[in-house]
């Protein structure tokens, strides 16, 4: 049975899309059929990591939500864009990056229930083993739904006071919605911090396991979402952490 | 499920305003028991009376009473699916709809 994993954070800029893309790539390297849905219709971006722009999107999630097509028509097989040969496959369901379409979906909204139906249809139509949901930050109806239907929630946070406060809200919401499994991922952690102490403190604070601490990486910043880090830097220490994270979340 | 919890569930659902589907912002504010039930409904997306009775550890009649209330309030809808010669009564989750353009309209516009 397919596993639905939401990658979420209370605040923006924590590294959700990069984390999601790296998890997808590692999943495909391990032979998995992975779907990635960009539900951040307000500020879509994960398609950039897969080397896509608006001219390459035949259909987007927006088209499905407006009833223009089936959700399988929005799935783009991006396996060939990875730049390396992998035994698995990745299907990206992007949100539209066209200004008018972003404005329209904000103005008019959409049927939230279609998201729920769509996720199930994707799993069935594409024979997926994993469906990764790259969510919009913060708490809204769409993120609540994503959390509610997920088998696993990966909560990304930075060691920053604003993130600490906001993450406690999301942990509480996730517990109320009964997510079967939840892990914290601390991203962009300064190397000067004691990571063992940070892990222990955060786990105690939220009563939730920390699956990984990703250090701030100049190499990651320099890449700047121009590609998927774990594929560009397969032997990098940060890639090793992503691999361990993938093992925890996806197996 | 014990009778007291069941009666509390019924009472809480009765007290909710009827709507055109569930609103996640509303779901998060409900009691633990009702929230758990609605979250189960959302996760299942489509289910039978028997599955709901099993989930709640309730007899079919009690489950039906609760289900009828949920249908009245607009949180689920009842469909009859035909699978070969077998008719399955399926209940599906409903969500409050913000916008939905009928598919046909695009044929006129495009």
Image: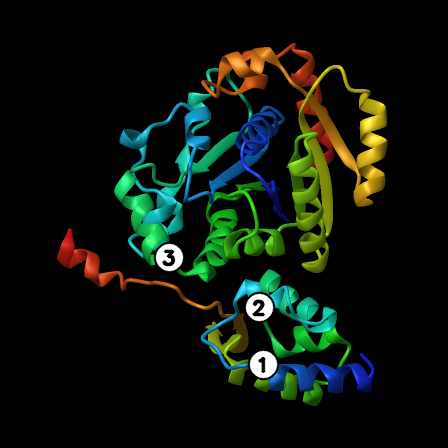
Residue B45 visible in image:
no
Residue A214 - label: none
Dot 3 lies on which element? loop
Q: Which residue is mark 3?
A: A109
Residue A231 position by quadrant? top right
Q: Nearer the viewer, residue A149 or B55?
A: A149
Please check whether the numbered discs 3 and 1 fall on a single chain: no
Dot 2 lies on which element? helix
**CA–CA distance between discs 3 and 1?**
24 Å
- B84 to B3, vertically: above or below: above
Residue B31 position by quadrant? bottom right
Quick check: marks 3 and 1 in contact, CB under 8 Å? Answer: no
Q: Quadrant of the C terminus of chain A?
A: top right
Please check whether the numbered discs 2 and 3 fall on a single chain: no
Give the color scheme: rainbow, by chain, secondary structure or one colour: rainbow
Chain that bears disc 3: A
The residue under the point 43% across, 32% down is A45
Chain that bears disc 1: B
**CA–CA distance between discs 2 and 3?**
18 Å
The numbered mark, 1 or 2, whose residue comes first in the sequence reads 1
Task: Describe residue A219's horizontal placement relative to residue A157 as left or right.
Answer: left
Q: Which residue is mark 1?
A: B16
Q: Which residue is mark 2?
A: B26
Task: Describe residue A237's horizontal placement relative to residue B19 as left or right.
Answer: right
Quick check: marks 1 and 2 in contact, CB under 8 Å? Answer: yes
Coordinates of residue A73 in the picture (x, y in percent): 35, 45
Q: Nearer the viewer, residue A68 or B12?
A: B12
Dot 1 lies on which element? loop
Coordinates of residue A97 in the picture (x, y in percent): 34, 36
Residue B61 visible in image:
yes
The residue under the point 49% across, 70% down is B94
Coordinates of residue A245 in the picture (x, y in percent): 70, 29
């Amino acid at each position: 049975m397919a596993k639905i994993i939401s990658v979420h954070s209370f605040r923006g800029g924590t590294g959700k899309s990069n984390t999601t893309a790296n998890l997808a790539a590692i999943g495909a390297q391990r032979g998995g059929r992975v779907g990635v849905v960009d539900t951040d219709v307000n500020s879509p971006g994960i398609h950039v990591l897969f080397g896509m722009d608006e001219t390459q999107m035949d259909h987007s999630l927006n088209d499905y939500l407006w009833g223009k097509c089936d959700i399988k028509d929005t799935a783009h097989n991006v396996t060939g864009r990875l730049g390396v040969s992998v035994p698995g496959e990745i299907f990206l369901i992007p949100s539209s990056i066209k200004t008018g379409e972003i404005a329209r979906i904000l103005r008019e909204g959409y049927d939230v229930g279609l998201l729920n139906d769509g996720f199930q249809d994707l799993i069935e139509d594409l024979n997926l083993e994993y469906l990764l949901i790259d969510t919009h930050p913060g708490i809204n109806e769409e993120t609540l739904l994503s959390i509610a239907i997920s088998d696993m929630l990966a909560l990304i946070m930075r060691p920053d006071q604003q993130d600490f406060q906001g993450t406690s809200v999301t942990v509480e919401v996730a517990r109320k919605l009964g997510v079967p499994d939840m892990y914290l991922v601390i991203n962009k952690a300064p190397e000067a911090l004691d990571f063992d102490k940070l892990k222990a403190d955060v786990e105690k604070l939220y009563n939730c396991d920390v699956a990984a601490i990703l250090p701030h990486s100049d190499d990651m910043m320099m890449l700047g979402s121009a590609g998927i880090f774990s594929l560009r830097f397969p032997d990098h220490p940060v890639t090793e952490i992503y691999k361990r994270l993938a093992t925890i979340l996806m197996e | 499920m014990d009778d007291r919890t069941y009666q509390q569930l019924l009472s809480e659902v009765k007290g909710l305003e009827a709507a055109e589907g569930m609103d996640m912002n509303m779901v998060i504010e409900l009691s633990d028991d009702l929230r758990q039930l609605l979250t189960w409904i959302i996760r299942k997306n489509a289910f039978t009376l028997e599955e709901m009775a099993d989930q709640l550890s309730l007899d079919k009649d009690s489950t039906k009473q609760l289900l009828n209330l949920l249908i009245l309030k607009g949180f689920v809808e009842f469909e009859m699916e035909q699978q070969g010669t077998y008719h399955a009564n399926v209940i599906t989750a409903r969500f409050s709809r913000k916008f939905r353009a009928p598919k046909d309209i695009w044929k006129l516009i495009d």
